[in-house]
Amino acid sequence: MNRTRRLRKTENIRRLVRENKLTIDDLIYPLFIEEGENIETEIVSMPGIKRFSLDTISKELDEVVALDIPAVLLFGIPSKKDATGSETWNDDGIMQQAVRFIKKSYPSLYVITDVCFCEYTSHGHCGIIHDNDVDNDATLPNIAKQVISHAKAGVDMVAPSGMMDGMIATIREALDNTGFTNIPIMSYAVKYSSAFYGPFRDAADSAPTFGDRRTYQMDPSNRDEGLREATFDDQEGADILMVKPALSYLDIIRDLKNNFDRPIACYNVSGEYAMIKAAAANGWIDGERVMMESLLSMKRAGADIIITYFAKEVAKVLSKK
């Protein structure tokens, strides 16, 4: 008789034969930075996550650095919005200020910026609106202006999330032509039009004022299309390919891992975070164990990098082991 249980008998043997391990090195922590002063506002639908102004964020960053989390992903929340999201390429905008502040005050921290428009547009969509839809090609020049402004501020990596066709080629060309050839691109290559984003829209003030994003984000029904999307971004020069959301799309993470010789990232999104927090608060689950198991499933599926609001909690758990 085969006795596979022999290798499960004690914790030490389980450690020796463990196939996948979650480490602090896998983690990126998202941060919401709001223009203004004396802002430290907890996001009700995301317990433990806050919006900070630059004058209040140092305590949070001190903790991130102390926990040895290697990278942060920044989302800016401006004080003014317009139809084009022009604050995204304002060299004195909130994102640019945040990059300069963090790189100066926390030089060991790797800083990534979300590249999109939804937090900055008065309509909440991810680009220029024509005929009640985002005009893909009209949006691309503004994406180029945005990434150049982030690069001038000192960002380490850019992460375009808008799902515009041709955005990676546009960004790579813009960076290369302005002397920023060493800045890598982490593409939201396979981003689904998901109901799991709900709490994020509270966090970033990015809900669309009309319609939805199904004309540019992917249909959750589709799997093969994800490979096509990732292939285009790979060919256009993306350095890292991301799947978003993560937990309901583990098959897509595995598809990318099997088909591309690049690091694969996934985004453990706000709705996934909020569900675990809510169930744990009600005593229905062991929140810490479910958190660790869910993130481990992303590693097992093939993710090399996990963007997660749990990053600080995970780092604390791992540091005890």
Image: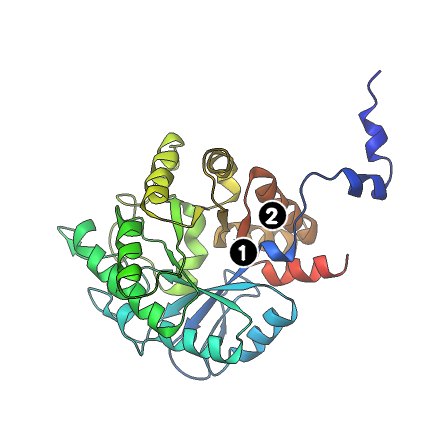
Q: Quadrant of the C terminus?
A: bottom right
**Could you tell me residue 8's position as x and y percent?**
82, 34
- Quadrant location of residue 312? bottom right
Is there CB contact under 8 Å for labels 2 and 1?
A: yes
Residue name at image x 84 percent, y 43 percent: 11
Name the residue that disc number 1 marks.
308
Residue name at image x 69 percent, y 62 percent: 316
Image height of 136 relative to 62, above or below:
above
Of helix, strand and loop, which one carries label 1? strand
**Could you tell me residue 9's position as x and y percent?**
86, 35
Of helix, strand and loop, which one carries label 2? helix
| Left or right relative to 72: residue 128 | left
* Amino acid residing under circle 2: Leu
**In terms of depth relative to the viewer, which is nearer, 37 or 312?**
312
Residue name at image x 65 percent, y 45 percent: 293
**Could you tell me residue 44's position as x and y percent?**
50, 64
Name the residue that disc number 2 marks.
295
Q: CA distance from mark 2 to mark 1?
A: 9 Å
* Amino acid residing under circle 1: Thr
- Quadrant location of residue 117? bottom left
- Quadrant location of residue 68? bottom right
Image height of 232 relative to 32, above or below:
above
The single residue placed furthest to the top in the displayed view is 1
| Left or right relative to 17: residue 201 | left
**In terms of depth relative to the viewer, which is nearer, 72 or 130?**
72
Mark number displayed over residue 1 = none
